[in-house]
């Protein structure tokens, strides 16, 4: 387990963190969830995307988080279990209807069940107007333009002194 400081949130599942012990900054992706997409002013945002990002930002920005690295994703982000004060962040976000469950294996934490409960209670994105489209489907329907793609390598493994 690594303790990191959260500097910000791109969308509801991608965080900018600092490992102050190692002197590194990098992006992490919260495991087992998928947040509504936020691309940029040059592309189409998914319904509830900016709101989900703002909610997650209000929970984690300027806070100390505990992360456990599970793997790297196709964008070389660290995919991590993330907790705040001992509470699993993915579980909290699913319970409140902020994100979708993205579980492709056995689900010992009951994340799909948490999503179903939030959906039945019309919490978060489930109460938001507009069509409910899984973020993975949204990315296929509305790919970001070259100009709007986020540069996820900027912070990765950079010493503090080299980041402006």
Image (cartoon, grey):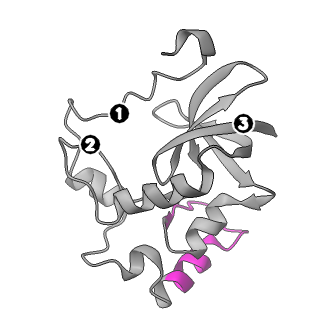
Task: Please state the total of marks drawn on the protein image.
Answer: 3
Q: Which mark is residue 4?
A: 3
Based on the picture, tell me whether residue 23 belongs to the magenta stretch. no
Q: Position of residue 113 (x, y in %)?
A: 60, 80
The residue tagged with tag 1: helix, strand or loop? loop
Closest to the observer: 106 or 82?
82
Q: Position of residue 55 (x, y in %)?
A: 49, 61
> What is the residue that sits farthest to the bottom in this orientation?
120
Judging by the rendered image, the residue that carries numbered circle 1 is: 150
Q: Is residue 20 depicted above or below 83 in this figure?
A: above
Numbered range of the magenta stretch: 100-118
Closest to the observer: 135 or 89?
89
What is the C-alpha distance between the residues marked 2 and 3? 26 Å
Q: Name the residue located 44 percent from the left edge and 55 percent from the top edge.
A: 53
Judging by the rendered image, the residue that carries numbered circle 2 is: 40
> What is the residue that sits farthest to the top in this orientation?
162
Q: N-terminal of the two: label 2 or label 3?
A: 3
At label 3, counting other C-alpha atoms closer than 10 Å, the crowd grade (few under 14, some 14-19, many 20 or more) is many
Q: Quadrant of residue 47?
A: bottom left
Q: Is residue 107 depicted above or below 122 in this figure?
A: above
Q: Position of residue 25 (x, y in %)?
A: 61, 25
Q: Is residue 161 left or right of residue 41?
A: right
Q: Is residue 59 depicted above or below 48 in this figure?
A: above
Q: Is residue 105 depicted above or below 142 in this figure?
A: below
Q: N-terminal of the two: label 3 or label 1?
A: 3
């Amino acid at each position: 387990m690594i303790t990191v400081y959260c500097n910000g949130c791109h969308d509801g599942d991608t965080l900018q963190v600092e490992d102050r012990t190692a002197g590194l900054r990098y992006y992490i992706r919260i495991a087992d969830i998928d947040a509504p997409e936020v691309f940029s002013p040059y592309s189409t945002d998914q319904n509830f995307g900016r709101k989900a990002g703002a909610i997650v930002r209000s929970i984690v920005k300027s806070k100390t988080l505990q992360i456990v690295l599970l793997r790297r994703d196709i964008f070389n982000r660290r995919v991590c279990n993330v907790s705040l004060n001992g509470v699993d962040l993915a579980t909290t976000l699913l319970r409140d209807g902020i994100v979708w469950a993205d579980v492709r294996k056995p689900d010992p934490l009951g994340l799909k069940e948490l999503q179903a409960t939030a959906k039945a209670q019309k919490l978060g994105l489930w109460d938001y107007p507009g069509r409910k489209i899984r973020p993975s489907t949204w990315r296929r329907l509305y790919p970001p333009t070259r100009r709007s793609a986020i540069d996820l390598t900027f912070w990765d493994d950079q010493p503090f002194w080299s980041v402006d």
